[in-house]
Image (spheres, rainbow, N blue to C red):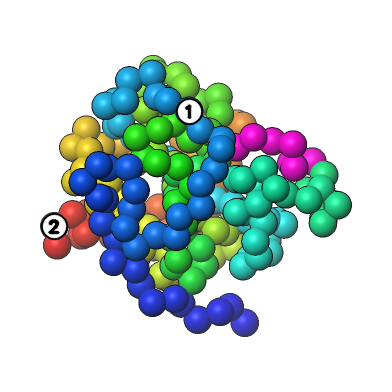
């Protein structure tokens, strides 16, 4: 049985537009400066579970901070040496964790293209949803994730409604997340409603 939702956080981008108030803060070393600091115009939604289809452990934090023990699970031997991160993660209880300051470049998208522009990490904010391609995501994740995206769109007006994409949209054939179990139309509708609130 899944854990009950956490108290829904009040999310707000602070005046420096680097950190999200209401989020847990765990700094990842896997980031660097953007080529153009003001060029933030895309939000990429991902799906992640470590180990696959298991939820609630410390392993996402460990992966993004280069502390994942390759002996802890057979799958971890394949990924422990990766140097990856995301700006934010929304877990199954609706808790938000921030790993990288929003003004910096997180290493989440990999080889990717959006509207003819490659290297989407340069100009995007990455949000992980704890889940997998073929298992339903939680109601609270849609609520919290949409509120988070609405805040980002307010802070960076260049992020329009058509600049919110799935990882699979910018890396087709290479990535499938957040997968068909993530109700994309529901999420986009919740973002739109949040922007009007």
> Which one is nearer the viewer's eye here, 113 or 18?
18
The residue carrying pointer 2 sits among few (fewer than 14), some (14 to 19) or many (20 or more) residues within 10 Å by Cα, namely few
Whole-percent x, y for residue 180 in the image: 53, 52
Segment tinted magenta in the rendering: 78-84
SS category of the residue bearing label 2: helix
Instruction: Please give the name of the residue rendered at 50% of the width and 43% of the height, measured from the top-left corner.
Output: 86
Please identify, in this view, whether the residue under mark 1 or under mark 2 is nearer the observer.
Answer: 1
Alpha carbon separation for disc pair 1 and 2: 33 Å
- The answer to whether one can see residue 75 in this image is no
Work out which residue is located at the far left of the displayed protein and give it.
Answer: 196
Q: Which residue is mark 1?
A: 32
Q: Which quadrant would residue 117 be assigned to in this image?
A: top left
Quadrant where the N terminus lies? Answer: bottom right
Instruction: Please give the name of the residue rendered at 86% of the width and 52% of the height, measured from the top-left corner.
Output: 71
Q: Which residue is mark 2?
A: 196
Quick check: marks 1 and 2 in contact, CB under 8 Å? no
Asked if the stretch drawn in magenta spans residue 80, the answer is yes
> In terms of secondary structure, what is the magenta stretch mainly?
loop
Q: Which quadrant would residue 148 be assigned to in this image?
A: bottom left
Could you tell whether 180 is left or right of 101 in the image?
A: right
**In this rendering, is residue 26 above or below 32?**
below
**In this rendering, is residue 129 above or below 139?**
above
- The answer to whether one can see residue 141 in this image is yes
Question: Which of marks 2 and 1 precedes in the sequence?
Answer: 1
> Which numbered disc covers residue 124?
none
Whole-percent x, y for residue 102 in the image: 36, 40
Could you tell whether 30 is left or right of 101 in the image?
A: right
Instruction: Please give the name of the residue rendered at 62% of the width and 54% of the height, measured from the top-left corner.
Output: 60
Could you tell whether 183 is left or right of 174 in the image?
A: left
Quadrant where the C terminus lies? Answer: bottom left
Q: Which quadrant would residue 183 be assigned to in this image?
A: bottom left
């Amino acid at each position: 049985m899944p854990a009950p939702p956490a108290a829904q956080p009040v999310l707000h981008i602070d005046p420096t537009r680097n950190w999200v108030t209401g989020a847990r803060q765990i700094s990842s070393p896997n980031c660097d400066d953007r080529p153009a600091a003001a060029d933030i115009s895309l939000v990429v939604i991902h799906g992640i579970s470590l180990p696959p289809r298991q939820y609630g452990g410390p392993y996402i934090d460990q992966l993004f901070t280069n502390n994942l023990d390759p002996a802890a699970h057979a799958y971890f031997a394949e990924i422990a040496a990766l140097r990856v991160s995301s700006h934010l993660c929304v877990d199954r209880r609706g808790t938000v964790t921030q790993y990288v300051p929003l003004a910096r470049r997180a290493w989440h998208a990999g080889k990717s293209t959006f509207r003819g522009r490659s290297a989407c990490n340069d100009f995007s904010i990455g949000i992980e949803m704890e889940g997998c391609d073929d298992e339903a995501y939680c109601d609270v994740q849609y609520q919290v994730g949409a509120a988070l995206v609405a805040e980002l769109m307010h802070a960076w007006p260049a992020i329009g409604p058509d600049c919110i994409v799935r990882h699979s949209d910018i890396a087709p054939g290479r990535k499938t997340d957040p997968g068909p179990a993530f109700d994309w139309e529901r999420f986009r509708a919740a973002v739109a409603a949040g922007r009007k609130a």
